[in-house]
Image (cartoon, rainbow, N blue to C red):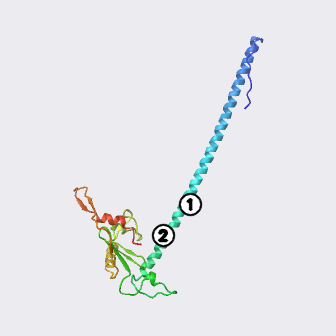
């Protein structure tokens, strides 16, 4: 921006001329101030445009990242679902027994079990005394069922307790299946952990009460694989 030198009234001029010169100088000063204000407003507008452009770019980057994360979660969900379906097929078709004939062309006995009397399972006594069982062929794990895993919606899909209804029949069937697994005959030795008792303070009575169910709830989603 070029600066213009604005001179004052000519002392040798008449009074009227000096007044006219003073008014002209004032107008020039006002014009120069207006130009500076306009330039400042222009710079402010350009700065706002830059910030808006930068904000749009960041929002776009965030949207792309969120979309990618959503796609990753969906892909992981499909992968987990496929793995669950594969596991359920193996679990359902496995005999959980030792024996079987394996050849280079047929190795199904390694994952679907054999036909011996002894079961191909490992048993482990957890820290609270519960016995967990794992098939050494298909990898299925039997552990004490917990009620929170037996809530289903109207379509029979497993849901959180707040979103469905408890199924006593399914829970009892799972208990029977678990007890059956603990009785599988096997000549494998059971491993064990240091045994502890879990307790909590009852807020109403202030006394210690058994907390085995709480322990089971906390580890219900794990397995021996």
Indicate the secondary structure of the residue bearing disc 2. helix
Residue 140 x, y percent position in the rendering: 40, 76
* Residue 155 x/y as whole percent: 42, 70
Badge 2 crowding class, 10 Å Cα cut-off, few under 14, some 14 to 19, many 20 or more, is few
Classify the position of the C terminus by image quarter: bottom left
Task: Mark 1 and mark 2 in contact? Answer it, CB < 8 Å.
Answer: no
Q: Earlier in the sequence, mark 1 or mark 2?
A: 1
Q: Nearer the viewer, residue 12 or 218?
A: 218
Q: Quadrant of the N terminus?
A: top right
Up the image or down, 179 lies above or below 106; here it is above
Residue 211 sits in quarter: bottom left
- Give the vertical position of 93 relative to 80 (above or below): below
Q: Which residue is mark 1?
A: 68
Residue receiving disc 2 = 80
Secondary structure of the residue carrying tag 1 is helix
Q: Position of residue 9 (x, y in %)?
A: 74, 16
Front residue of 14 and 118:
118
Q: Residues within 10 Å of mark 1 (few under 14, many from 20)?
A: few
Specify whether 100 is left or right of 56. Answer: left
Q: Position of residue 123 (x, y in %)?
A: 34, 76
Q: Is residue 194 left or right of residue 52?
A: left
**Quadrant assignment, res 142:** bottom left
**7 versus 225 height, above or below:** above
C-alpha gap between disc 1 and disc 2: 18 Å
Residue at the spot 59% in from the left edge and 50% down from the top edge: 58
């Amino acid at each position: 921006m070029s600066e213009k030198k604005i001179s004052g009234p000519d002392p040798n001029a008449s009074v009227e001329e000096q007044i006219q010169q003073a008014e002209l100088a004032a107008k020039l000063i006002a014009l120069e101030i207006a130009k500076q204000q306009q330039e400042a407003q222009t710079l402010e507008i350009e700065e706002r445009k830059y910030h808006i452009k930068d904000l749009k770019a960041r929002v776009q980057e965030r949207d792309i990242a969120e979309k990618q994360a959503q796609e990753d979660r969906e892909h992981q969900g499909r992968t987990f679902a496929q793995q669950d379906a594969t596991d359920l097929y193996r679990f359902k078709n496995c005999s959980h027994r030792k024996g079987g004939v394996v050849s280079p062309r047929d190795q199904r006995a390694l994952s679907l079990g054999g036909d011996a009397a002894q079961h191909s399972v490992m048993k482990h006594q957890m820290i609270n005394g519960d016995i967990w069982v794992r098939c050494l062929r298909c990898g299925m794990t039997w552990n004490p069922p917990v009620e929170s895993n037996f809530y289903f919606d109207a379509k029979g899909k497993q849901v959180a307790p707040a979103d469905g209804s408890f199924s006593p029949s399914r829970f009892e069937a799972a208990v029977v299946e678990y007890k059956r697994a603990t009785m599988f005959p096997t000549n494998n030795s059971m491993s064990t952990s240091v045994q502890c008792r879990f307790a909590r303070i009852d807020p109403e009575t202030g006394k210690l009460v058994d907390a085995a169910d709480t322990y089971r709830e906390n580890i219900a989603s794990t397995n021996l694989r």
